[in-house]
Amino acid sequence: MPKRGLDRLFTYASPEIFAESPQKNQFTCAAKHIMQNTLNKIFSRHALTNVARIAAIAAACVTMSALTLAKPPITPPTEITLNIDSTDTTDSSDSSDTTQSNLVSACVCDLNQDRTVDSADLGTLLGLFGPCQSADPGDFNFDAAIDSSDLGTMLGNFGPCPSGLSWATVLQWNPDPDVVPDAAVRAKIVASGYPWRVLDTGTGIEMLLIPGGTFTMGCSASNSYGCYSDESPNHQVTLSKAFYLGKTEVTQAQWQAKMGSNPSTYKNYSDSPSRPVETVSWNDIAGFNTATGLRLPSEAEWEYACRGGTTTAFHSMPSYPNGTNVDSLLGNIAWYSSNAGSTTHAVAGKAANAFGMYDMSGNVWEWCNDWWGSTYYSTSPSMDPAGPSSGSYRVLRGGGWGYISDPCRSSYRDSVGPDPRGYGVGFRVARTP
């Protein structure tokens, strides 16, 4: 049996140009008319004269350019990009690289979210010219100003938006700064070319894009609890590709709709459909994922998504954007033994982290795809680790409603065999775009 005896799970009693553009000849009309007669003015963020006239002229110029420029297909590809400056456009997957991305997804320019970048969006953009908060709508290059660079980006992306993902409905292409506060992270999401917030059409599960990056995986002690040997050594891990992860744990309603039954212990409450499904084994979930095309996250993906850029025991929360090591603050983000009242709770009831993920700590334990290894961190590859090739136990993360703050730490690892249906054990799904 693995360390700390997860048999407790079964016995716990309570329940951002024209000048550089190769298309500059086609855009001369727009460049001269708009750049000379418009951009030298100071625009109000709330009012602009002749917006309709300017928008119509720009739209006409773009239409004329279509006679000499081949129109890109709508799908495939799923990404239309514009080089918005002359620097290298290679996107680094290293999260420590804070240079702004030079790739802009076409639908970032769809300011009115009607799936087309057109004169309406242009009028809105011109009305917003001037200083702004980084990544405000229209600030396509995240430089805290809406200016000629952003205008060039929009004109370069006129037309229908790409179709998105075959398996999901796009809910929101652009990352919301209120949910994803780090401008560098938002830039990476945009650079991926994938929509940020989607709804898996087969299950109704809402998923958010987690950009690739590098982080330190391993021991993050809290003020009250140290780390265990299997959380060491701390080591740098790079996730080379973006992936989607469930915004919440899979709910009872989502499981029931796909599997036709509900194994949960806490299923006789008025809010039970919104509570996480639990008492499901790793093998049960394999069946769910086979039926849906989804998958479990790797342990490295799980910890990276849980931390959301923090290095502390507990991820970010209100008033603590960099996370905290203070155990008594855990109740801001988690349902655990001190506040859960011996039961699970509806998902998304506590504060989300800097990736927009809820309940990464507490509520129910979450299965990961990996086999568990007590000394795996000593030999784990630095690029996209997938766990040991075999084993007897599968990894569990996050702690649960019936546990103290210790297992709710971002680095805490535990495990149990893949067959038992652990009391208080659930999961969230992942998908590779």
Image (cartoon, rainbow, N blue to C red):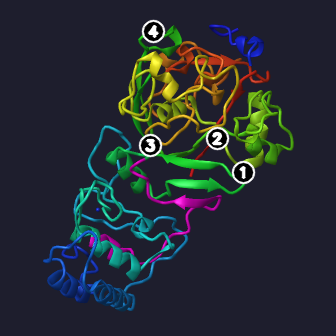
* Residue tagged 3: 212
What type is the residue that disc 2 sits on? Val
Q: Are marks 2 and 1 in contact (CB under 8 Å)?
A: yes
Residue 398: % across, % down: 58, 25
Q: Where's residue 295, x and y in %? A: 66, 41
Left or right relative to 238: residue 18 = left
Which region of the structure is painted magenta? 151-178
Measured along the vertical axis of the image, is residue 287 above or below residue 222? below
Q: Amino acid at mark 3?
A: Gly
| Residue named by callout 4 | 224
Nearest to the eye among marks 2 and 4: give it: 4
Residue type at numbered disc 1: Thr
Query: What is the CA distance from the residue labelled 2 to the residue labelled 3?
Result: 17 Å
Query: How far is the residue under mark 2 from the one under mark 1?
Result: 11 Å
Q: Choose the circle earlier in sequence order: 2 or 3.
A: 3
Q: Is residue 410 visible?
A: no
Name the foreground residue: 116 vs 126.
126
Quote the CA–CA distance across marks 2 and 4: 31 Å
Q: Which residue is mark 2?
A: 429
* Label whose residue precedes the other's in the sequence (4 or 1): 1
Residue lying at 64% horizontally and 29% vertically, measured from the top left: 366
Sequence-wise, the earlier of marks 4 and 3 is 3
Question: Horizontal placement of 352 versus 178: left or right?
Answer: right
**Crowding at mark 1 (Cα within 10 Å: few <14, some 14-19, many 20+):** some
| Circles 4, 1 touching at the beta carbon (< 8 Å) | no
Which numbered disc flags the more N-terminal residue, 1 or 3?
Answer: 1
The span from disc 4 to disc 1 (Cα, nearest Å) is 39 Å
Q: Give the answer, above or below, for where 417 lies relative to 71.
A: above
Identify the residue position indicated by label 1 in the image.
203
